[in-house]
Each structure stands twice: as C-alpha cells, then as structure tokens.
Amino acid sequence: MSYSIQINTDEIASKFDFSSSIIYDTITDQLSCTIDAYLDLFNPSTTYKIGQQFQILLQHLFTSNSMNETYQSIHESSIILPNEKILMASMNNTQTLFSSSNHCIQHEFIQQVNKQSQKIAIEIDEQSLTYNELLYYAQCLSLQFLTNSNFIPGSVVC
C-alpha cells in the first residue's frame, strides 16, 4: 500500500477549517485522499501527522481482513505512529527494584517518608504535597474508610 503526503502551503484559501475528500478510482484500483486545512489554525506538521494517522488507520483496516485476522471495529484500531510508540515505551518504563526486606508498597512509601519527609512527593498544577503531608492525608483517608465500612483489620481491600 503505497502512499504520499504533500503539503501545499501556497493554497491558503480553504472553504472550511479542516476538510478531507476520499476518491476511489475504479480504473487504477486506487484510493486517494486530500486533506485541506486552514493554515492559521493548523500547522503543516499537524496536518502531516493527521495524514499519517489516517494512512495507518486505512492500512490496518484494509490489511487486517485480508490476512484472516478477526474483524476489528474502527474504534478498536490504533492510530499511534511508530515514533510515538517508541516514545511511550520509553516514558512508561517505570520499573523499580524494591529492597528485599520490604514486600509491600506501603512499606516502601513509609521508607521514602523517613528518608525525605520534606521533599515534594506530588505536584499538580500549582499545588504540591511533601512526603509527610501525603502520608498524613493517606492515613486520614484510610481511617475514614475503615470507620465507615464493614471491613475488619487484616481484610484485603483492592
């Protein structure tokens, strides 16, 4: 399945902010797609990326049925580009080896609180919590949960 993506920056005038047209040529048995984007709203790189994602989606839809794979709905298809998959894999590599003496994550957390109680543990927008503050709120939440539920100490809670 060959494809080409071209961005013509000379044709700035567009009837809509973003539009696409798909044409199937029965003589050459080819599908062509044209994407028009208003350059004041869309960067050429964004338009190019949308074109790549659309090409991946079409390629997946046309090749999956021909290779005797199970039918997959369009909403189940992925439009993640190969370079984005590599980036996500590198960012999601969060494995950490825990010390052998502690078997539970709560013990590791307490150990971090003891090591660096005044360092920032969580930061969201303009708000932050130190490890000490986070431990305090976690303990308040667990006590409230235990007093308002029918669990007994030692019960496993997901």
Image: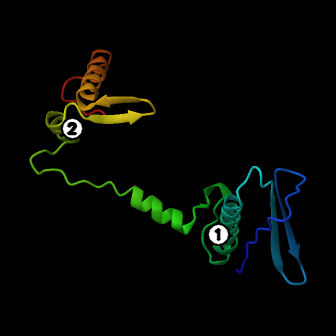
| Mark sitting on residue 42 | none
103 sits to left or right of 50? left
**Residue in view at x 16 percent, y 38 percent:** 107
Instruction: Identify whether 63 is placed above or below 138.
Output: below
Q: Report the amino acid beneath label 1.
A: His
Q: Position of residue 2 (x, y in %)?
A: 71, 81
Q: How many callouts does the rendering have?
A: 2
Residue hosting label 2: 109
Q: Amino acid at mark 2?
A: Phe
- Badge 2 crowding class, 10 Å Cα cut-off, few under 14, some 14 to 19, many 20 or more, is some
> Mark 1 against mark 2, which lies toward the viewer?
2
Dividing the picture into quarters, in which one does residue 24 lie? Answer: bottom right
Q: Quadrant of the C terminus?
A: top left
Q: Residue 6: give x, y in percent of width and height.
A: 76, 72
State the residue in front, 150 or 56. Answer: 56
Question: Upstream in the sequence, badge 1 or badge 2?
Answer: 1
| Element type where label 2 sits in the image | helix
Residue assigned mark 1:
60
Near-viewer residue (129 or 77):
129
Of residues 23 and 155, the one drawn nearer to the viewer in this rendering = 23
